[in-house]
Image (tube, rainbow, N blue to C red):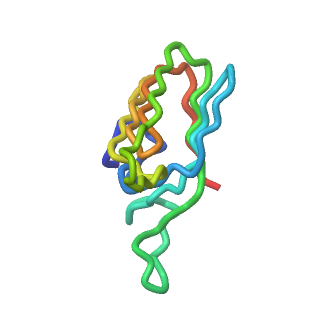
Amino acid sequence: MSAGGHPRLDGIDLPTSYILGVIYDDESLTLEMDFHLLDGHPRYAAPEDGAEGCYRKGFVRFADLDDLRLRKAKPEAGRDVDYSDIYSATIEGDYANISSGWGEIELTARSIQIALD
């Protein structure tokens, strides 16, 4: 695991994963993900047809939020930004800090669920 201490992230490389969507309501924040699985992950399968890695869709859901800070990215004029890119990510205990093309998310939550489809 290259980012964070959550046991469900063992064998997942967050900085080379992608955020597909962000869903926020009064009770939770959910990141729809395309997780990059590493060789040691139980759901890993060798890439086929020249693919760059093993990716599986899933989500990270933060609920019972104690603190939430969102800063939406403001790309420079004329510059293309891939909102799905993750620049850095830490999910440890009840704390998460994720910097991506979408923006920066920093939070503490009593419940953090991570699942693969």
At a point 40% along the width and 36% down the height, the residue shown is 98
The answer to whether residue 1 shows anywhere in this view is yes
Percent position of residue 102, x then y: 47, 42
Q: Is 74 rendered above or below residue 84?
A: above
Q: How many marks?
A: 0
Q: Is residue 73 or residue 17 the one in the foreground?
A: 73
Q: Is residue 113 or residue 51 the one in the foreground?
A: 51
The answer to whether residue 11 shows anywhere in this view is no
At a point 36% along the width and 35% down the height, the residue shown is 90
Say left or right for 29 vs 103: right
At a point 56% along the width and 40% down the height, the residue shown is 60
Q: Is 27 rendered above or below residue 33?
A: above
Q: Is 89 rendered above or below residue 12?
A: above
Extreme residue toward the right, this view: 26
Percent position of residue 116, x then y: 59, 52
Extreme residue toward the top, this view: 66
Q: Quadrant of residue 59?
A: top right
Q: Is residue 10 or residue 85 the one in the foreground?
A: 85
Say left or right for 2 vs 36: left
Q: Is 58 rendered above or below residue 5?
A: below
Q: Quadrant of residue 9?
A: top left
Q: Quadrant of residue 24?
A: top right
Percent position of residue 82, x then y: 44, 55
Extreme residue toward the front, this view: 77
Query: Which quadrant is the C terminus positioned in?
Result: bottom right
At a point 44% along the width and 40% down the height, the residue shown is 7
